[in-house]
């Protein structure tokens, strides 16, 4: 009889590395001064395993992005980052600073252990928006170049 390895459970197959998971779930940033430094530390923790986990979490990520009815601007920005994440990974740009920062921003948005709970009306997505803004500003040239190489028009509102 040939034994096959058991299929990983869904929770296990999409597991985010523990050190990154702890960073995403931290209740305070006392050890990290400012949001930019928080993004730096988080992106440094994005490993190939974290990138693979985010790829496996693609459907829940897109469902959560699609559910942003009241924040169209943030939704469009997250869609842009999600497209870049998928395409840059396919193009062999996995592990670049831009790809790791984008992965961290998407994981932060998806994770749901926010500094400001998403459920708070009008302010719940501010922390997500700040992280997305930092990543977009840091990598504007890379992201825009990626868009233009694909003969797309870069969105004016970014």
Image (cartoon, rainbow, N blue to C red):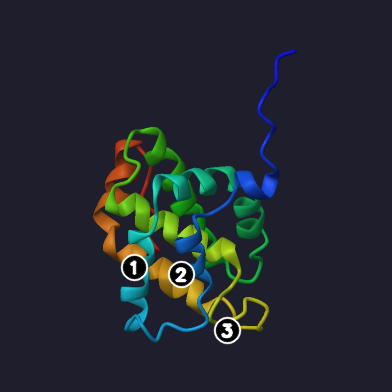
- Mark 1 → mark 2, Cα distance in angstroms: 8 Å
Which residue bears the numbered disc 3?
A: 123
- Mark 1 → mark 3, Cα distance in angstroms: 24 Å
* Figure disc tally: 3
- Mark 3 → mark 2, Cα distance in angstroms: 22 Å
From the image, state whether disc 3 or disc 2 is nearer to you: 2
In the rendered image, which quarter is residue 105 located in? bottom left
Which of pointers 1 and 2 lies earlier in the amino acid sequence? 2
Which of pointers 1 and 3 lies earlier in the amino acid sequence? 1
* Secondary element at image label 1: helix
Please give the name of the residue rendered at 65% of the width and 52% of the height, measured from the top-left corner. 60
Depth check, front residue: 152 or 12: 12
**Label 1 environment density (alpha carbons within 10 Å; few <14, some 14–19, many ≥20):** some
Q: In the figure, 53 relative to 36: above or below?
A: above
Tell me the quadrant of the picture where the N terminus can be found.
top right
In contact (CB < 8 Å): disc 1 and disc 2: yes
Give the side of residue 1 with respect to residue 45, left or right.
right
Which residue bears the numbered disc 2?
A: 23
Depth check, front residue: 22 or 98: 22
Q: Please state the horizontal and vertical placement of residue 113, each as a whole percent of the image.
A: 59, 73
Give the side of residue 31 with respect to residue 16, left or right.
left
**Label 3 environment density (alpha carbons within 10 Å; few <14, some 14–19, many ≥20):** few
Q: In the figure, 42 relative to 100: above or below?
A: below
In the rendered image, which quarter is residue 41 located in? bottom left
* Secondary element at image label 3: loop
Which residue bears the numbered disc 1?
A: 41
Q: Please state the horizontal and vertical placement of residue 40, each as a whole percent of the image.
A: 31, 67
């Amino acid at each position: 009889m040939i034994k096959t390895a058991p299929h990983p459970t869904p929770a296990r197959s999409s597991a985010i590395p523990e050190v990154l998971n702890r960073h995403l779930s931290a209740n305070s940033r006392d050890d990290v001064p400012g949001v930019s430094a928080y993004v730096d530390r988080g992106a440094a923790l994005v490993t190939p395993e974290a990138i693979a986990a985010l790829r496996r979490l693609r459907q829940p990520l897109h469902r959560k992005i699609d559910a942003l009815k009241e924040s169209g601007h943030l939704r469009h920005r997250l869609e842009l980052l999600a497209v870049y994440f998928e395409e840059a990974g396919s193009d062999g740009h996995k592990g670049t600073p831009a790809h790791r920062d984008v992965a961290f921003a998407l994981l932060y948005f998806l994770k749901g252990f926010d500094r400001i709970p998403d459920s708070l009306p009008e302010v719940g997505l501010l922390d997500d928006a700040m992280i997305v803004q930092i990543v977009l500003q840091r990598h504007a040239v890379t992201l825009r170049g990626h868009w233009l190489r694909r003969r797309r028009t870069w969105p004016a509102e970014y």
